[in-house]
Structure formats: structure tokens, C-alpha cells
Amino acid sequence: RRLGIDEVPRVDSFVAVGEMVMASLKAGSNYRLYLDFNSRFQKELVPFFSKTDISLIRHSDIDLFMRKLLDRKLSPATVSNYFIVLKRVGSWCRDWLRN
């Protein structure tokens, strides 16, 4: 049971899942982590994946996202931080669907 929700809502967009992750982080004990993750989520992940069905995201989409970040000459550490947020959203979705 997450966020006080008893039933699994219909969630198929990357942004909808990401928003649930951000709400979960905000409700948690590490508010700074929420601020960092939410900033990265809103700045790059939301515009790139917009309303994409999360089940349709493929490795090629993730590679394209990485190339977009690298083309902007972001440091490897910054790119890695975006991927940490992306991984958290994907893991949360996988765990949500298992339960």
C-alpha cells in the first residue's frame, strides 16, 4: 500500500508513474532527495517522455534520451543523476505492478 491508496489506479504514462514516485519521496523523510529528484524529473524526463506509455519505453528511447543529454555537453555525473531518477521511476513501476 503506497500513499494511502488501497487499489491500484490505472497508470500507464511515464509521467503519471513519475508523479507517484515524486509524491512518495515528498512524503518520506529525505526532503532534499525529493527536491533533487523532482527537479531532474521535471526538467528533462517529463519533456522527453511526456505522455509516453511506460510499457512502450524501449532501450532505444533511453539511448536517445542519453544522447540528448550528452549532446548538451552535460557532465557524466549529471547524466548519471538523470538516470538514477529514471531508474527509480522504472523500479517503482515494476514493484507497483507486482503488488
Image (cartoon, rainbow, N blue to C red):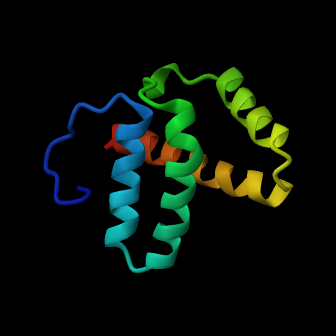
Q: Can you see residue 88?
A: no
User: Which quadrant of the view contains residue 71?
Assistant: top right
Above or below, 78 against 64 in this view is: below
Q: Is residue 48 left or right of residue 2?
A: right
Q: Can you see residue 2?
A: yes
Q: Is residue 35 left or right of residue 11?
A: right
User: Which quadrant of the figure contains the N terminus?
Assistant: bottom left
> How many marks on residues?
0
User: Which quadrant of the figure contains the C terminus?
Assistant: top left
User: Which quadrant of the view contains residue 97?
Assistant: top left
Q: Is residue 66 left or right of residue 92?
A: right
User: Which quadrant of the view contains residue 51?
Assistant: top left
The x, y position of residue 3, in whole percent, is 23, 59
Looking at the image, the residue that sits furthest to the bottom is 29
Seen at 59% across and 44% down, the residue is 44
Q: Nearer the viewer, residue 51 or 58?
A: 51
Looking at the image, the residue that sits furthest to the left is 6
Q: Is residue 46 left or right of residue 60?
A: left
Q: Nearer the viewer, residue 91 or 75?
A: 75
The x, y position of residue 5, in whole percent, is 16, 52
Looking at the image, the residue that sits furthest to the front is 72
Above or below, 27 against 37 in this view is: below
Seen at 53% across and 59% down, the residue is 39
Seen at 81% across and 51% down, the residue is 74
Seen at 57% across and 33% down, the residue is 48
